[in-house]
């Protein structure tokens, strides 16, 4: 039965008209849902979180999965995008007067993050691996500490009073646009360059891949997307502070990427969705009402001993789930595999061969 | 004595204490990395567990400092072996990042598990006589003295183990080559377990000494210190034991001296900018050797 | 197979969440649902735990007394507890869930301003009453874009600027301090506001700030800053810090040879402080929301009940959460109906509510209570009342 459905799906997904139709209906739905309250406000919010997290995970996967680096700076780029756009809509071009300029403010947030992406991109010409990881970690701490020292944006007290401009259609639009952008990048010549850098940087240099240019673009694109996600996040929360963008946030995005799978856009989408939704489903009250159909003899002890304690224990369950996923799928759930809809026609057959599994072993050089 | 001189000497002493603590944690990172080329991000949380062991042993069993320290080291050493066997060993053939992410997961698990048991911060009783000597206005506490000397002793001991014993030789051999060394009859699994036990045991020692110096402990105490110790290990040249020590004392001094010279608001900003520049200038760490990549 | 799972995750989950809400709202309303957003995980779990304990205690007492009568019908109170992991995005999610899924009549919490400010925006937008027990940041109850107070957001505590001014005045007038050092957590919003206002007021009163030092959340070593403070030679050290930090800072300060009195904020107020600081805060002063030793009978009853149930004396978060619950139940009793607008109006009209932390009423058109602070001193293993203070 499931196999039949799956075959049917595959056949359906081969149709060229399918993707535009799906996207268009998605966009229409994104407008209809808030308009006619098809979903509760809470479910809409979770959908928006899912969208923002998809942008974050897919863009981090570009650096951490496709290029094989270990970046911890993503929350920092998010912070830059968030603060830049928030300052624009609050102080420079007050959104109360110019509501149509919101997309420009978001773009500006992304652009600012991309510029700061240079700070990580340039050292990456020279530094790799764990040393680059330290540079990204240091970058994150510098951004956080820098914002804490700028009183203009509220310092540690944060920036509040940001207008709620992020809506479901906007999140849908940016998510689709950025995922499409990254997907095209990955399957372009630059994308091959990114993969070749992961496999062997020196060899790809010798094969006349311009590794500097490739890294430059990959880091800029990745931080650009993080900046846009940050801008959307700021105009959804209406309040940002440096503590929002700390190492815990970066760790969260890392978990989404590696849970879903490295070097896989579909995987990142899956990881971001699972992570966001699981955290919400594991809320005690949600769990209790979801399981309330159980007979009282089963439900009551379960509720008393387990569900009502989930508030604290859900944060224990999440990392355990992560460890189990890693033990059984060491490359993440969809690691190195791609959802067929994302693979361009000319790559369909070659896909498995362009992503050799063995290539991911980095041989540590002896000192 | 001159007041300014005393001020600087005092800050120097502070830097030594902080550096000593960082060094003990950084050693664990660097040992595991040296042998397995794996960053054990759960290390900071093993350190936290060490502090909690120390708390339990000293308050529940009422033990004094030396048995507490030894039992804590034993406990975290065992914990290290268990973590390695359950979470890392199955992944030895997997890509490096999956082990790193598993380590992050183990760390989060340890933090939140401890938290779920009790969310309140704990106070460690004074296990060592807490005396402050006043030398011409320079204050030196017995705890500072113990930390600085004990960390130097443990580092020396570790250096001896790695460079002068058979097990140390086996460790170095495995870090040199993972394909042929097992063929020479070296029990790789056992050596790796011992490495983890020593690394985690050191984290336990660091945790209990930390708990003495900073006697309020909570489940999240290992995160920031752990990341900083990782930075120390990398700055010194990851995989290099003496490097980890050098890196630790550098980070300790930089953090203290930035506060001494500048408004303390800028501490993290300046300290991390300096570290970033250092890595860019010397991309393989201070005592690390440049890796020659075979083509 | 994998593909099918992949495509099904989001729709199934969203449906599940939707169902989780709908299942509840179809029941006839036979309880009063109150939402509680607390910091069970994240970087201040102790705050969340105290707050939850106090709220559960309050709800237990209300229900043991038969519930709350609204418009002639008596309802038991049902508490829906949500964790916000001390994060703003989770606070927003929790607030949205409580409002749109669980149909709560009002929300208590979050406690830390980091979560309380964005959650307050959600409550205001959805016209649902929100009472934060502990968030002292002025922005929580203020609509920042218009500068006017929010109409659905209230708090049970006083604000940071108030506290900073109170303590500066106390330090100059009662302790006779001429030179003060300030040491606070730069990454935390409340201490920063308190430190700024203290500095400003202390200078206005003719004092001199000789050191203005900071640390960052998660720091454990303060030796460099303390050495600097010691060499500046202040008369007092102002230390607006959370009590577990105070435990560490005070011990290190004494070890570094700083003998001057420390003056702290309401965040000191936990009996844990005395254990954590191991005698290093003996004789020091701090501002608090209530004084247990001159407590009213109502407060005594609360303290005994809390200690009896959880085995420790309530800290300020617990006392304020209990008061927030008390304020809400006073409002509910006066409310003509169980709808959110009526409850909010009843809340704004609450006059002279006698809570554990003193007599609370709200200034017209504002969610900030009019109340005074008390100054406490640490003596032995007790906090002793020194004086009532207003700026």
Image (spheres, coloured by chain):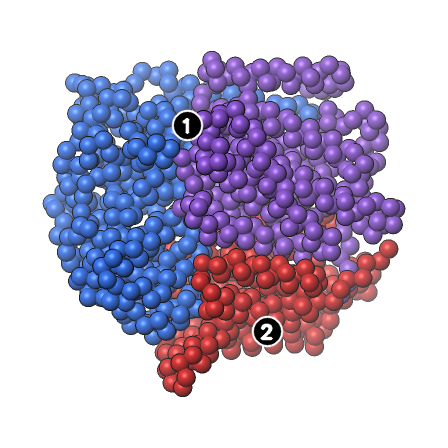
Chain colours: A purple, B red, C blue
> Which quarter of the picture shows residue C115?
top left
Helix, strand or loop status at disc 2 = helix
* Residue identified by numbered label 2: B155
Q: Which numbered disc covers residue C39? A: none
Q: Quadrant of residue C210?
A: bottom left
Residue that appears at 77% across and 45% down: A213
Residue found 56% across the figure and 50% down from its top: A140
Residue annotated with mark 1: C97
Q: Work out which residue is located at the far right of the displayed protein and give it.
A: A207
Q: Is residue C63 left or right of residue A27?
A: left
Q: Horizontally, is C367 left or right of A187 in the view? A: left
Where is residue C236? Give x, y as percent. 27, 66
Residue located 56% across and 33% down the image: A106
The chain holding disc 2 is B
Label 1 residue SS: helix
User: Looking at the image, is A175 positioned above or below residue B142?
Assistant: above
Where, quadrant-wise, is the N terminus of chain A in this rendering?
top right
Residue B11 in view, yes or no: yes
Could you tell me which residue is drawn at 60 percent across and 67 percent down? B247
- From the viewer's perspective, is residue C368 above or below residue A248? above
The front one of C17 and A195 is A195
Q: Quadrant of the C terminus of chain A?
A: bottom right
- Tag 1 and tag 2 share a subunit: no
The spot of residue C33 in percent (x, y) is: 30, 26
């Amino acid at each position: 039965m499931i196999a039949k459905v799956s075959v049917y799906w595959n056949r359906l997904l081969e149709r060229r008209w399918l993707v535009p139709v799906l996207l268009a209906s998605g966009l229409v739905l994104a407008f209809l849902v808030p308009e006619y309250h098809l979903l509760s406000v809470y479910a809409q919010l979770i959908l928006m979180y899912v969208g923002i997290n998809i942008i974050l995970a897919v863009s981090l996967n570009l650096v951490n999965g496709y290029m094989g680096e270990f970046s911890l700076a993503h929350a920092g780029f998010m912070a830059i995008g968030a603060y830049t756009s928030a300052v624009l809509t609050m102080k420079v071009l007050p959104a109360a007067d110019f509501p149509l300029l919101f997309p420009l403010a978001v773009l500006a947030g992304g652009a600012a993050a991309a510029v700061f992406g240079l700070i990580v991109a340039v050292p990456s010409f020279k530094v790799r691996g764990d040393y680059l990881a330290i540079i990204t970690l240091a970058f994150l701490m510098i951004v956080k500490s820098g914002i804490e020292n700028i009183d203009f944006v509220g310092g540690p007290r944060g920036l509040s009073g940001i207008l709620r401009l992020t809506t479901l259609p906007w999140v849908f639009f940016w998510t689709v646009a950025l995922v499409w952008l990254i997907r095209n990048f990955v399957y372009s010549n630059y994308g091959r360059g990114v993969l070749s850098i992961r496999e062997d940087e020196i060899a790809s240099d010798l094969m006349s891949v311009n590794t500097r240019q490739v890294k430059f673009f990959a880091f800029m694109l990745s931080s650009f997307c993080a900046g846009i996600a940050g801008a959307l996040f700021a105009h959804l929360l209406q309040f940002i502070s440096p503590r929002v963008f700390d190492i815990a946030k970066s760790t969260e995005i890392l978990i989404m990427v590696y849970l879903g799978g490295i070097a896989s856009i579909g995987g990142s989408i899956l990881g971001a969705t699972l992570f966001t939704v699981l955290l919400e489903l594991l809320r005690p009250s949600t769990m209790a009402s979801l399981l309330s159909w159980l007979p009282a003899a089963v439900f009551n002890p379960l509720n008393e001993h387990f569900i009502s304690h989930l508030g604290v224990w859900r944060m224990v369950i999440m990392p355990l789930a992560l460890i189990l996923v890693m033990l059984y799928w060491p490359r993440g759930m969809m690691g190195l595999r791609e959802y067929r809809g994302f693979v361009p026609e000319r790559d369909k057959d070659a896909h498995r061969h362009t992503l050799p599994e063995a290539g991911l072993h980095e041989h540590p050089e002896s000192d | 004595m001159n007041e300014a001189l005393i001020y600087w000497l005092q800050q120097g002493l502070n830097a030594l204490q902080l550096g000593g603590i960082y060094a003990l944690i950084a050693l664990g990172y660097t040992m595991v990395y040296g042998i397995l080329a794996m960053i054990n991000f759960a290390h900071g949380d093993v350190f936290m567990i060490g502090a909690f062991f120390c708390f339990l042993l000293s308050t529940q069993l009422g033990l004094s400092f030396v048995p507490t320290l030894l039992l804590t080291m034993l406990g975290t050493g065992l914990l290290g072996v268990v973590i390695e066997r359950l979470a890392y060993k199955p992944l030895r053939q997997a890509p490096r990042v999956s082990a790193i992410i598993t380590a992050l997961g183990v760390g989060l698990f340890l933090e939140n598990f401890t938290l779920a048991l009790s969310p309140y911060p704990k106070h460690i009783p004074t296990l060592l006589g807490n005396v402050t000597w006043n030398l011409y206005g320079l204050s030196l506490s017995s705890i500072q003295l113990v930390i600085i000397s004990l960390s130097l002793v443990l580092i020396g001991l570790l250096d001896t183990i790695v460079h002068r014993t058979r097990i140390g030789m086996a460790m170095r051999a495995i870090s040199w080559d993972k394909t042929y060394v097992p063929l020479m009859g070296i029990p790789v699994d056992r050596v790796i377990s011992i490495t983890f036990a020593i690394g985690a045991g050191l984290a336990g020692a660091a945790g209990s000494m930390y708990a003495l110096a900073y006697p309020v402990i909570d489940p999240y105490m290992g995160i920031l210190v752990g990341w900083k110790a990782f930075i120390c290990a990398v700055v010194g040249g990851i995989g290099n034991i003496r490097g980890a020590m050098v890196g630790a004392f550098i980070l300790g001094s930089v953090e203290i001296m930035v506060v001494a010279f500048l408004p303390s608001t800028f501490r993290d900003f300046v300290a991390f900018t300096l570290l970033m520049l250092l890595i860019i200038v010397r991309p393989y760490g201070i005592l690390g050797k440049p890796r020659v990549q075979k083509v | 197979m994998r593909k099918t799972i992949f495509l099904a995750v989001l729709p199934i989950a969203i449906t599940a969440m939707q169902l989780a809400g709908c299942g509840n709202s179809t029941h006839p309303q036979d309880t009063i649902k109150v939402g509680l957003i607390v910091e069970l995980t994240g970087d201040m779990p102790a705050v969340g735990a105290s707050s939850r304990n106090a709220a559960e205690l309050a709800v237990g007492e209300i229900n043991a007394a038969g519930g709350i009568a609204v418009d002639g019908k008596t309802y038991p109170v049902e508490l829906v507890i949500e964790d916000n992991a001390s994060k703003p995005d989770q606070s927003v999610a929790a607030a949205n869930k409580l409002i749109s899924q669980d149909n709560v009549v009002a929300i208590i919490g979050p406690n830390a301003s980091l979560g309380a400010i964005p959650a307050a925006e959600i409550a205001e937008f959805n016209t649902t009453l929100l009472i934060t027990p502990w968030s002292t940041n002025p922005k929580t109850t203020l609509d920042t874009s218009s500068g006017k107070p929010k109409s659905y957001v209230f708090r049970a505590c006083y604000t940071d600027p108030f506290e900073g001014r109170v303590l500066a005045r106390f330090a100059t007038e009662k302790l006779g301090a001429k030179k003060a050092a300030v040491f606070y957590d730069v990454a935390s919003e409340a201490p920063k506001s308190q430190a700024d206002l203290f500095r400003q007021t202390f200078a206005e009163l003719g004092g001199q700030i000789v050191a203005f030092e900071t640390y960052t959340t998660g720091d454990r070593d303060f030796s460099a800053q303390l050495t600097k403070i010691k060499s500046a030679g202040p008369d007092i050290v102002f230390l607006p810090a959370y009590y577990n930090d105070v435990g560490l800072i005070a011990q290190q300060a004494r070890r570094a040879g700083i003998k001057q009195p420390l003056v702290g904020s309401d965040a000191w107020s936990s009996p844990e402080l005395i254990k954590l600081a191991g005698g290093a805060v003996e004789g020091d002063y701090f501002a608090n929301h209530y004084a247990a030793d001159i407590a009213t009978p109502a407060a005594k009853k609360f303290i005994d009940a809390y200690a009896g149930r959880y085995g420790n004396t309530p800290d300020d978060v617990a006392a304020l959460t209990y008061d927030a619950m008390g304020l809400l139940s006073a409002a509910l009793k006066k409310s003509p109906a169980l709808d959110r607008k009526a409850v909010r109006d009843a809340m704004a009209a609450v006059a002279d509510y006698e809570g554990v932390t003193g007599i609370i009423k709200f200034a017209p058109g504002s969610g900030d209570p009019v109340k005074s602070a008390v100054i406490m001193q640490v003596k032995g293993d007790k906090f002793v009342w020194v004086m009532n203070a207003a700026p």
